Image (cartoon, rainbow, N blue to C red):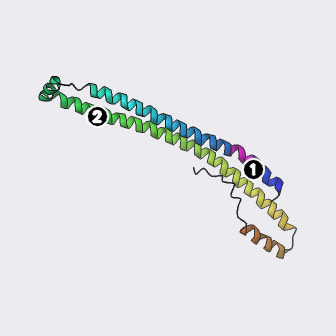
Amino acid sequence: MSKELKQNHQRHFLPLLAQKKQMVKRHQQTSKFLAEKQRKRQQQETKKRQARLNEGIHSIWDRLTGKHDQIQKMNEIEAYQSYLRDQVEKDTLIFRQLEERGELQHRLDSLKHNQQEEINKLKEALFAKLPEEKITQLRQEFDRSPSNPEHHYDMNM
């Protein structure tokens, strides 16, 4: 492949790869922020639920009257609802991030496909002007040559 063609391909990929790097960093920061926000909220809600339970002699009276069990049951229900709410928030974030990641991956794949077609057309144009025995030899060389390992264009992170 010509040097110009390689440079042209790389010039088109570099902005997408930079975008990928920024996206990964942003996703990590957003996930970390959400986890911290949920952790703090969970601590506050746990304190609030614990504060409903009386202490000392009032606690004994609440246990005798059944009020303690009612409060405990209500606390468990609220804790589970909080867990579900947090899980929905987390899932929503993950799905939004996967969608963004998929869109960028599609753009990378499309660009890679278009560039491969361009390379194939260049090869065919080159082969059209050569004798058959030279074409066979060159095709074998093209098939054996590994793709450039520094070009890693998929979104696996």
Q: Residue lying at the far left in this picture: please name it.
A: 64
The quadrant where residue 16 appears: top right
Please state which of residues 107 and 29 is positioned toward the viewer in this rendering: 29
Q: Of 84 and 50, which appears nearest the observer?
A: 50
Name the residue that disc number 2 marks: 77
Instruction: Describe the element under mark 1 as helix, strand or loop.
Output: helix
Where is residue 75? Give x, y as percent.
Answer: 27, 31
Quadrant in the picture for the N terminus:
bottom right
Query: Mark 2 against mark 1, which lies toward the viewer?
Result: 1
Magenta segment boundaries in residue numbering: 12-16
The residue positioned 59% from the left and 42% from the top of the image is 24
Q: Name the residue type under label 2.
A: Ile
For residue 28, which quarter of the picture? top right
7 in the magenta segment: no
Disc 2 to disc 1, C-alpha distance: 56 Å
- Measured from the top left, where is residue 19 in percent x and y? 66, 41
Question: Left or right: 44 with respect to 28?
Answer: left
| Residue name at image x 36 percent, y 31 percent | 43
- Earlier in the chain: of badge 2 and badge 1, it is 1
Choose between 148 and 131: the one closer to the eye. 148
Q: Which residue was labeled with disc 1?
A: 10
Q: Are marks 2 and 1 in contact (CB under 8 Å)?
A: no
Residue at 83% across / 76% down in the picture?
133
State yes or no: residue 15 in magenta.
yes
Which of the 4 quarters of the picture holds residue 144? bottom right
**What residue occupies the far top of the structure in this picture?**
58
Q: Amino acid at mark 1?
A: Gln
SS of the residue at dot 2? helix
For the point 83% across and 73% down, the residue is 134
How far across and down, in percent of the image, does residue 87 sit?
Answer: 41, 39
Q: Is residue 84 above or below residue 65?
A: below
